[in-house]
Amino acid sequence: MSKVFTLEEVEKHNTLDSLWVIFNDRVYDVTEFAQDHPGGDDIIVEFAGKDITAVMYDKNYHEHSESAYDMLEPYVIGTVEGVEINQGAARHMEGIRASLHRRRVNLLQSEEEFNTFTKEDFKPNETDVAHDKKVHQFLDLNKPLVPQFFKLKFTREHYLEQVHKPRYLNRPADFFGHPLLEPLSKTVWWVVPLIWLPYVGYNFYKSLQYGNPLATTLYFFLGIFIWTFLEYALHRFLFHYDDRMPQHQMMYLLHFVLHGFHHYLPMDRLRLVVPPTLFVILAYPWITAAHLLFPKLMAFGVVAGGMFGYVCYDMTHYYVHHAKPFKIHFAEMKRYHLAHHYKDFEAGYGITSKFWDYVFKTAITNY
């Protein structure tokens, strides 16, 4: 069982001969480590016997790598009185996550687009493909992208850092590099309403046949509301399952195909809306669930509204990437969504509105 120390006991160990610190409510005896500290032992002595949690996470004072937190682990000797060790461990992991998030944001800040994405005439710089491959050791944009995942090896963090660093080409990228598969990865924007609006009309008509137009209308709007939640949830928990992703090359490929490509090449016009085949796979379970859970009148009405909400989502997504939108609502949503790409890809998941971002406290506020 871990030993428990009072703050007074820790404070007594404040010299190089016996040097203890507190980090996330755990007590560490770093006496032996002090002389090997990369920043010198004087900076450790300054905080001897004290809580260093805030300092460890303050990059402006003394930035630490992720390995720095791992180096502390062998020196843990107990916890502070009144705090369970598992609570301290949880705070430790939260701190590591916050540090990782800051590093990712800093990478975006180094790009010119971080300072220009809010401009009405925003246009990103074209990527120097040869230079990008040489410097970042990631994908070669002159070759089909998907096959490269079967040859290259990345760490998860390197993959996430690079896939969320936007690149720009003056042409559509080669996705599969196969004459039969390549067309399946491309969708022009007008295909979405062309295919799915008739399906919306079909479901609305089927609901009306049950003889209650008011109920059909109410369920239609309920379906739109349900879609707004699915839009948020799918974007946040499926498309951005970044740090929950198993560390395996095929999982990186799945992530890339689902949504990573869009962050990697966010202005590719032919890959901004969801290909019909992929959307059938994503939508089928939800449509089936609606018919299992609701009576037929309600199911058809909800599905009609949900599919209409999806069409609005995909059209809005294309619109904010490639148009000069109306100043009412859409101009703001364009800035908001581009902030998701160029400022903080771990927040701002709403495309058509910010509603669920406010509900779940993931809104981007400064952009």
Image: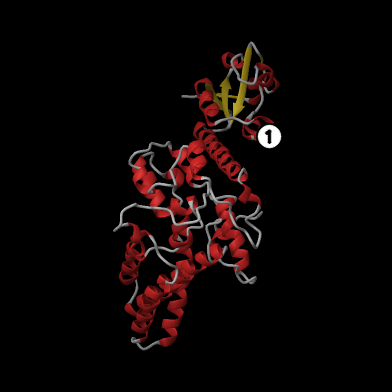
Whole-percent x and y of residue 184? 34, 61
Q: Nearer the viewer, residue 199 or 22?
A: 199
Q: Which residue is mark 1?
A: 60
Q: Residue at x 61, y 60 (%)?
A: 335
Q: Is residue 161 left or right of residue 23?
A: left
Quadrant hosting residue 152: top left
Above or below, comparing residue 27 to residue 337 in the picture: above
Q: Residue at x 58, y 57 (%)?
A: 338
Q: Please, which residue is most extreme toward the bottom here? A: 211
Dot 1: few (<14), some (14–19), or many (≥20) neighbours within 10 Å? Answer: few
Q: Please, which residue is most extreme toward the right here? A: 46
Q: Nearer the viewer, residue 110 or 56?
A: 110
Q: Residue at x 49, y 60 (%)?
A: 232
Residue 3 visible to an observer of this rendering = no
Whole-percent x and y of residue 46? 70, 21
Quadrant in the picture for the C terminus: bottom right
Q: Residue at x 42, y 67 (%)?
A: 188
Quadrant hosting residue 348: bottom right
Q: Is residue 352 left or right of residue 147?
A: right
Whole-percent x and y of residue 176? 34, 52
